[in-house]
Amino acid sequence: MADERLSRKGYWRTNLKYLAILLSVWFFTSYGLGILLVEPLNQVKIGGFPLGFWFAQQGSIYVFVILIFIYVWLMNRLDKKYQQEE
C-alpha cells in the first residue's frame, strides 16, 4: 500500500513537472516571442511577413501542437515506467 502511494506520488509529480515545462515553453513562445520580443524579431522576414508577426499569428499555434505530441510521447514513457494501464 505504501509503495503504491509513493508510486502514485512520483507519477503525478513527474506529470506536473512535464506540464510546467511544456506550458512554460508555450508561454515563452506565445507571449515572449509574439509580444515582448516582437520588435527584434520583426527585423527578420519569412514569406514577406515579419517573424514577430508570424510568431504571434501562427508560431505559437504550431509550437502548441508540437508540444501536445511531445506530451503524449513523454506520458507514454512515464506510463511504461510506472506500469500504468490505460
Image (tube, rainbow, N blue to C red):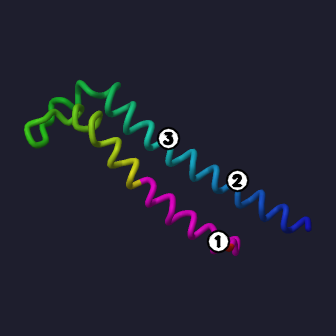
Q: Residue 43, image x and y in percent? A: 15, 30
Task: Give the structural element (helix, strand or loop) at label 3.
Answer: helix
Q: Describe residue 16's horizontal placement relative to residue 59 as left or right.
A: right
The image's mark for residue 86 is 1
Q: Amino acid at mark 2?
A: Arg
Q: Residue at point 23% right, 24% down?
A: 39
* Type of amino acid under label 3: Ser
Span colored in magenta: 67-84
Asked whether disc 1 touches disc 3, contact meaning CB atoms under 8 Å apart, the reply is no
Between disc 2 and disc 3, whose residue precedes? 2
Which residue is denoted by mark 2 in the rendering?
13
Q: Disc 1 to disc 3, how far (Cα)?
A: 27 Å
Query: In the image, is 54 to the left or to the right of 29?
Result: left
Q: Look at the image and say whether residue 78 sits in the magenta stretch.
A: yes
Of all residues shown, which one is farthest toward the front?
86
Secondary structure state at the residue bearing disc 2: helix
Expressed as whole percent of the image width and height from the top left, the position of residue 23 reads 50, 43
Where does residue 6 sit, x and y in percent of width and height?
82, 62
Q: Which mark is residue 40?
A: none
Q: Label 1 is placed on what type of residue? A: Glu
Can you tell which mark lies on residue 24?
3
Dot placed on the residue nearer the N-terminal end, 1 or 2: 2
**With respect to residue 17, does 58 lie above or below?**
above
On screen, residue 75 versus residue 14, left or right, reads: left
